[in-house]
Amino acid sequence: MPEGSPKGASGKWAGRKPRLYILTEGAKQNEEKDMPEKVVRIGVIGVGTQGTRHIECFRQIPRAEVVAAADIDQARLKEVCARYEIKAAFTDYHQMVKEAEMDAVSIVLPDDMHLEPALAAIDAGLDLLVEKPLATKVEEAEAIVKAAREKGVRLMTNFSNRWQQPVALVKEAYVAGDLGKPVYVYARLSNTLMVPTEMIRPWVKRTSLPFWLMSHTVDRVRWIYGAEAKKVYGISRSGVLKSMGIDVEDIYLATVEWDNGAFSTFESSWILPTSLPANIDSKMMFIFTEGAAYFDAQAAMMEMASKERYRIPPMLSTSTRGRIQGFVIEALRHFVDSVAERKELGPSGEDGLAVCRITSAIVESAQKGKAIEL
Ligand SMILES: NC(=O)c1ccc[n+]([C@@H]2O[C@H](COP(=O)([O-])OP(=O)(O)OC[C@H]3O[C@@H](n4cnc5c(N)ncnc54)[C@H](O)[C@@H]3O)[C@@H](O)[C@H]2O)c1
C-alpha cells in the first residue's frame, strides 16, 4: 500500500494521500497560544441574548476579562452583572467608555444601533468588536470604518461563521487548489418563527433578513472566494408575519455575481414552523470546476427526544462538560488574541462595510424590482 493511504485502502482510494490542510489564517496564532498572557479588559455593550453569550465565552478565554457592562434594561443588567461577577454596570454606554478602565469593547446592540456606541468607543481609543451586521446603512458602516482607521484602533466585525469548521474547510481546500475555480454557491440560512416573533421581537422591524441572516452567508462566500460582488438581484415576499402584526418580509432570495466569474444564490426566511427540531436551518452547496462541497449544519449528528420535545442539538457551537466549544467562542478568542498581541484581525471593519453594501443592495433590488450594479 502506498505510504499515506488510508488504512486498508484499496480500489479507488489506493494511492490517495490524505491531505492535511494548513489552516490559512489561524495556524500561526494558535501555535502561540501558550505565550505569557496579557489580560484584555473588555466592556460589553448590550447584555441581551448575544451579549450574554459574549460574556460567557470571554469568561472561558484565559486572557480576557469582562470588567464592565452596559444596557438600558436596568433589571437585566443587574441580573447579568451579578451572575457573572461584573463589577462595573452602566445604563449609559457613553459613561462606560469614558469611566471604565478597559482595553476593548464588544458592541452587541440591535442591528441598527451599532454606529453611536462604535463612534464613542473609537473616540475613547478602544479596540472594538462589533456584532454583525456592522450597520444597516452603508453610510453608517463607512463612518465606523473611517473613524477607526483615523484613530488607529482595531475593529472586527463579528462574522463568526468563518470559524465554522465546514466553512473553513472549504476555504482551505479552495486555497490549496483542490477544487478548481469557483462556479456557483447555494446558501440557505433561515430561522423558525421564534426569532421574529419572540427573540428579536422588540426591534425586528428595524432590521431585515438580508442584515440579520444573509450578512453571514454573504460573508462566508465573499471570504471563501476572496472576491467582490459585482451585481445583485433580490426578491422578497411578505404576508405571514404581516398577518401577525409584524411588518417585515417573510423570505428573501438573492443572486450575487462575483468579480471572479462565479455567482451565488442566497435564501433566508424566518417563518419556518417552531415545531422543527432546531431554530436554524443552514445548508450550503458549492460547485467548483474540479470539485463540490455540501454541508448541512443541522444534519443530525445526534437527535434527542424528551417527553415534550424532539430536537437536533447544534454541534457547531456547543458546550461540553461546561466548556464552550465551536465557532462562537473561537471568533471571540481571535479578537482577544489580536488585541493582546496587537495583531491584525479579520473579519475587519472593511469586511463589514463590503457585506453591508451587498446586503443593502439586496434590499434595494427587492424594493425596486431590478438588479443593482455595485
Ligand atoms: N454573530 C452571530 O452569530 C450573532 C448571533 C446573534 C445575534 N447577533 C447580533 O448581536 C446583536 C444583538 O442581538 P441580540 O439577539 O443579542 O439582541 P437582544 O435584543 O437580545 O439584545 C439587545 C440588548 O441591547 C440592549 N439595548 C438596546 N438599546 C440600548 C441602548 N441604547 N443602550 C444600551 N443597551 C441597549 C437591550 O436592552 C438588550 O438587552 C445584533 O446585532 C445581532 O445581529 C449576532
Image (cartoon, rainbow, N blue to C red):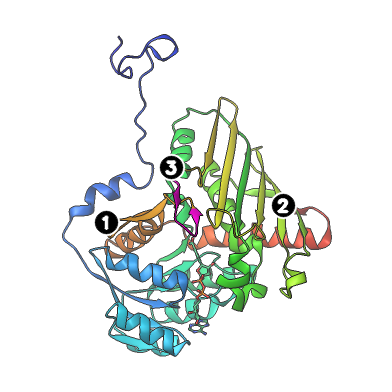
Q: Earlier in the sequence, mark 2 or mark 3?
A: 2
In the rendered image, the vertical position of residue 199 relative to residue 121, given as above or below:
above
Q: Is tag 1's residue or tag 2's residue first in the polypeptide sequence?
A: 2
x and y percent of residue 103 in the render? Answer: 31, 75
Q: Quadrant of residue 346?
A: bottom left
Q: Position of residue 173 (x, y in %)?
A: 45, 33
Q: Quadrant of residue 54?
A: bottom left
* Up-down relation of residue 99 to residue 307 (above or below): below
Inter-mark Cα distance, 1 to 2: 39 Å
Can the viewer see residue 153 in this picture? no
Determine whether, in the image, residue 241 is placed left or right of residue 322. Answer: right
Instruction: Tell me whether circle 1 and circle 3 mark residues in contact (CB < 8 Å).
Output: no
Give the residues in magenta.
302-310
Residue at (44, 56) in percent of width and height: 306
Q: For numbered disc 2, what is the local secondary structure?
A: strand
Q: Are marks 1 and 2 in contact (CB under 8 Å)?
A: no
Q: Amino acid at mark 3?
A: Met
Q: Which mark is residue 120?
A: none
Say which residue appears at 52% left-offset and 57% top-offset: 351
The answer to whether residue 43 is above or below residue 325 is below
Residue 309 among those drawn in magenta: yes
For disc 3, the marked residue is 301
Left or right, 355 with reference to 70: right
For badge 1, the amino acid type reads Arg
Element at badge 3? loop
Q: What separation in Å lies between label 1 and label 3 (alpha carbons)?
A: 18 Å
Query: Which residue matches tag 1?
Result: 321
Q: CB of mark 2 within 8 Å of CB of mark 3?
A: no
Q: Amino acid at mark 2?
A: Leu
Q: Which residue is mark 2?
A: 253
